[in-house]
Image (cartoon, grey):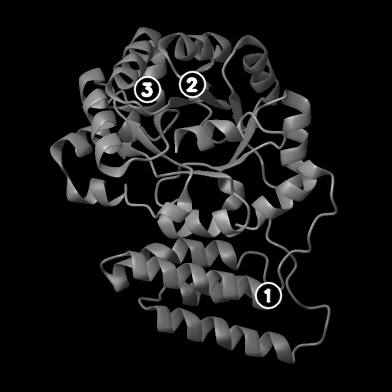
Amino acid sequence: MTSSFLQLLRGESTPLYLAPQAGVSESPFRRLCREFGADVVVTEFVSAEGIVRGNQRTLDYLRFDDEERPIGIQIFGADPAAMSEAAAFVTDTFAPDFVDINFGCPVKKVVKRNGGSGCLRDLDLVGRIIRACVRATSLPVTAKIRSGFDEATRDPVAIGLRCQEAGATVLTLHPRTRADMYSGNARWDEIAAVKEALDIPVIGNGDVRSGGDARRMRDETGCDGIMIARGSHGDPWIFKEARAALAGEPLPDSPSVEERFQICIQHARNAVAFEHDPQKAMREFRKHLGWYTKGLPGGKHLRQELFQVTSLHEAEAILEGYLEQHRSEPEGSEFVGAPR
C-alpha cells in the first residue's frame, strides 16, 4: 500500500489528486473521479475528537472500497494527543495508504477550535501534531496547509519547512491564507517557492479548473503532483482532461448532455447505495445535481425542480424530461459548457 502511493510521486507522470472536501469527496464521488483518471483520492476531513469518541457519523466518513486506493484519510484537530490516537485508530481499523493532516480548512466552526488553518497561528503546535501522528502510525503522514492564517503570518516556506522537519513525507499547499477564504487568485509562485525549499514532494492546489490549468501549474511551479478541488464539482472528467493536457495530447471532447446526465445518475445511484438512508442521500446529492446542470439552457428552472427531489426516481424523471425536450430542439441550442 505505502510503496504504491509514494511511487506515484517518483514516476514520470504528474499524479492527480482529488482534494478532501467536506460533503463532496464521499466514497461514490471518489470512485467516479478514479474512473476518470484521479491517481490519488483523500477522504473528507474528519475530526480527531470524533474518532477518539467513537462517534458513528464520524466513523462513517472513513469507509472506503479497495478500488479507491491509493487513498488517504484526512484528520484535523488541535490536540496532539487526540490526533495521535486518531492516527493510530484509522491505521489499525481502516488501513489507508497514508494519513493526511488538515492545516488548511478555513471554516469558522473548525478554526474557532484551533483546528484546520487555525493551527497556522502556532507553528510549534503544527510540529507537535505532526510528530505525534508520525509516532502513532507506520503509514506516511502528509500535511495540507495554506500559506498562513492571514497576511501578517503569510510564510508558506517557513510553514512547509516546519512540516518537513516534524516528519511529514508529502506537503500540499493551497496558496491562500485563511483570511482569503476562496477569494482572489491562488498565488502559484508560492508553490514554486515551497517546492524549491523542501526536500519532500510538494503537491499544488488551488484554481485548477481545467486541464490547461493543470498543465500550467506543473510548468510554472515544478510541483510533484496536482490536487483538484472545486474544479471537480459536477465535472469529474476534469481528471481525464488534465491527464491529456499534462501529456501534451489533444483534449478529449466534453461530454454531451446525455453523457453528462448518465454520469450524474451513475453518481446518484452509487450515493444512494452507499448511504444508509436513501432520502438523506438524495437530499445531500442535490448540490451535485446543481453542479452537473450548470451551463444548460433553462438550467435555472431545471435546478429549481432538482433541488426539491427526495428520491432517485424523481431525479431520473426530471432529467429524462429535460432530455426529451432537449432532443426535440434544433441543433445549436444545447449545452454551452459548465463554467468553472
Say which residue appears at 78% left-offset and 78% top-offset: 333
Q: Position of residue 22 (x, y in %)?
A: 40, 46
Picture layout, residue 43 above or below residue 86: below
Quarter placement of the N terminus: top left
Mark 2 closeness class: few <14, some 14–19, many ≥20 residues within 10 Å: many
Quarter of the image for residue 101 reads top left
Circle 2: residue type = Thr
Of residue 56 and residue 23, the one placed in the foreground of this image is 56
Which numbered dot is residue 257?
Answer: 1
Relative placement, left or right, of 197 versus 133 is: right
> Where 125 sits versus 310, above or below?
above
Mark before the other along the chain sequence, 3 or 1 = 3
Q: Which is in the foreground here, disc 1 or disc 2?
A: 2
- Residue at disc 1, secondary structure: helix
Identify the mark at residue 118; answer none if there is no mark.
3
The kind of residue tagged 1 is Val
How many numbered markers are drawn? 3
Closest to the observer, 113 or 250: 250
Graded by Cα atoms within 10 Å as few (under 14), some (14 to 19) or many (20 or more), the crowding at tag 1 reads many
Comparing 178 with 100, the one in front is 100
Q: Residue at x 65, y 18 (%)?
A: 195
**Would you say residue 340 is visible in this rendering?**
no
Question: CA gap, disc 1 to disc 2?
Answer: 42 Å
Q: Which residue has dot 2 on it? A: 169
Q: In the rendering, at what x and y percent does residue 324 appear? A: 64, 90
Of pointers 1 and 2, the one earlier in the residue sequence: 2
Q: Is residue 148 depicted above or below 290 in this figure?
A: above
User: Which residue is nearer to you in this view: 65 or 190?
Assistant: 65
Q: Going 51% across and 83% down the picture, which residue do you hit? A: 318
Please state which of the two labelled residues, at mark 3 or mark 1, is closer to the viewer.
1
Amino acid under disc 3: Gly
